[in-house]
Image (spheres, rainbow, N blue to C red):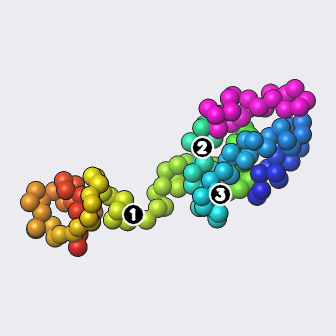
């Protein structure tokens, strides 16, 4: 849903004009600048994003009718209109498939791999392909 349509919906529900709500709804969808499909929503379309909107815009948005509308209610409306429910950040993150580079503990100039029995410290995490001590991945 486009931010303008979210804003029209907000004006219908809470009074005022769509322009009163456009900055907030644009903020939720700003991540489209970086990822132009549904995955952009992983950055702000969740419970934490709603609270971050409240921190950014304040507790309420004052519309052109002078009415104070809770920012959290507007954020919840935006997320529900896009997703049908309000997920948590954990809901999004738990669905990311891990890649070896995500497990690195320290930056290295060149990636390397070795076998668990070749690791001098032998600190391999159970069920993981990354050495907890040196950051190498199973080759």
Quadrant of res 131: bottom left
Q: Which residue is mark 1?
A: 98
Mark 3 and mark 1 in contact (Cβ < 8 Å)? no
Mark 3 and mark 2 in contact (Cβ < 8 Å)? no
Classify 4 as above or below 48.
below
* Lower position in the chain sequence, tag 2 or tag 1: 2
Q: In the rendering, at what x and y percent does residue 4 appear?
A: 82, 51
* Lower position in the chain sequence, tag 2 or tag 3: 3
Q: Is residue 122 left or right of residue 6?
A: left
| Local secondary structure at mark 2 | helix
- Residue density around tag 3, few if under 14, some if 14–19, many if 20 or more, within 10 Å: some
Q: Which residue is mark 2?
A: 49
Q: Is residue 56 magenta?
A: yes
Q: Is residue 44 magenta?
A: no
Which part of the image, by quadrant, shows the N terminus? bottom right
Q: In the rendering, at what x and y percent does residue 41 appear?
A: 62, 55
Quadrant of res 32: bottom right
Q: In the rendering, at what x and y percent does residue 88 appear?
A: 55, 48
Q: Which residue is mark 3?
A: 32
Residue drawn at (77%, 56%), measured in percent from left and top? 2
Q: Which residues are magenta?
A: 53-72
Classify 103 as above or below 65.
below
| Local secondary structure at mark 3 | helix
- Residue density around tag 2, few if under 14, some if 14–19, many if 20 or more, within 10 Å: many
Q: Marks 2/1: CA distance?
A: 22 Å
- Residue density around tag 1, few if under 14, some if 14–19, many if 20 or more, within 10 Å: few
């Amino acid at each position: 849903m486009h931010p303008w349509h979210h804003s029209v919906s907000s004006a219908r529900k809470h009074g005022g004009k769509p322009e009163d709500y456009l900055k907030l709804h644009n903020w939720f969808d700003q991540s489209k600048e970086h990822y132009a499909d549904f995955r952009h929503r992983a950055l702000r379309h969740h419970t934490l994003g709603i609270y971050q909107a409240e921190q950014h815009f304040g507790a309420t948005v004052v519309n052109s009718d002078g009415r104070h509308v809770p920012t959290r209610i507007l954020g919840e409306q935006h997320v529900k209109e896009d997703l049908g429910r309000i997920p948590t950040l954990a809901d999004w993150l738990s669905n990311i498939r891990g890649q070896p580079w995500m497990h690195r503990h320290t930056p290295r100039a060149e990636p390397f791999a070795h076998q668990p029995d070749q690791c001098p410290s032998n600190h391999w995490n159970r069920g993981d392909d990354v050495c907890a001590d040196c950051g190498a991945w199973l080759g």
